[in-house]
Image (spheres, rainbow, N blue to C red):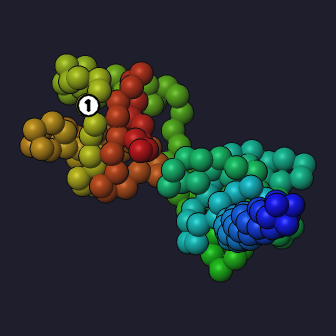
Amino acid sequence: MNLDLFNNLVNSVKENNIVQSFIKELSNYLEKQNNKLLNEEYNRKDNGILKQENCLYQVVEMDVDGVYLQNTENNSVSKEMDISKEILNKIGNDSVLRFKDGSYIYEEELTKQFYDSLIDVKKYKNIQDNFVKKSNILEIDPDTRYKIELSKDNYYLLSYENNGKSTIEVPKELIPFWAKNGDNLYYKNGKFNRYFR
């Protein structure tokens, strides 16, 4: 009987070793997969900013050890420390950069267009007041989403409600600079903003 007890004990230890071995192998596999995913994500990120190829970024703030950039596609802001000194010497707040082929390029023409689009507060307020008087914007539900259908030299045509059958003309100065045809907007506190999902 002592021999049976010993055999049962040995078999129990073998089974326990198999389970422990399986758990150890599974843990190792899961850890390798997790590290692989983390490495892939790290390779896509650099200094905390997810860089998108051929995407435009606008300088929000210059800092001692980097630059805060706003992605013009989704308005996310991140600090970037990997910009060449040559570009850092050319840029300032509101400058436009493009991420292309693994580095940033200063977009002088786009930066100039952005600066040219800026108007003083008094002129902006006059345009805004005239728009409110001439349009029915204050009668439209404030939760309405507008879609940019067309952009002309002086205005944008926005569609809304009833599957886009209603339209409104909006002076270009009241539309965010980075908005483009097909973008969705909302109107709040007297101005249009881009709608991000």
Residue at horizontal 65 percent and vertical 47 percent from the top: 77
Of the 4 image quadrants, the one containing the N terminus is: bottom right
In this rendering, position of residue 14 left or right of residue 95: right
Query: Is 96 left or right of 66, judged from the image as shown?
Result: left
Number of other residues with Cα within 10 Å of mark 1, as a class: few under 14, some 14 to 19, many 20 or more:
few
From this viewpoint, is residue 129 visible? yes
Which residue is farthest front? 1
Q: Position of residue 140 (x, y in %)?
A: 20, 24
Q: How many marks?
A: 1
Q: Which quarter of the figure has residue 109?
A: bottom right
Mark 1 — residue? Answer: 144
Quadrant of the image for the C terminus?
top left
Residue lying farthest to the right in this orientation:
64
**Disc 1 marks which amino acid?**
Thr
Extreme bottom residue here? 101
Classify 197 as above or below 137.
below
Identify the image quadrant of residue 24. bottom right
Residue 83 shows in this picture = no
Residue at the (23%, 53%) spot, across then down: 149
**Is 100 in front, or is 109?**
100
> In the image shown, does 127 or 144 lie closer to the viewer?
144
The local secondary structure at tag 1 comes to: loop
Q: Is residue 22 above or below residue 111?
A: below
Q: Residue drawn 79% across and 64% down?
A: 4
In this picture, residue 144 sits left or right of residue 127: left
Q: Position of residue 89 (x, y in %)?
A: 84, 62
Camera-side residue of 85 and 80: 80
Write the residue at 42% across / 21% down.
Answer: 189
Up the image or down, 106 lies above or below 189; here it is below
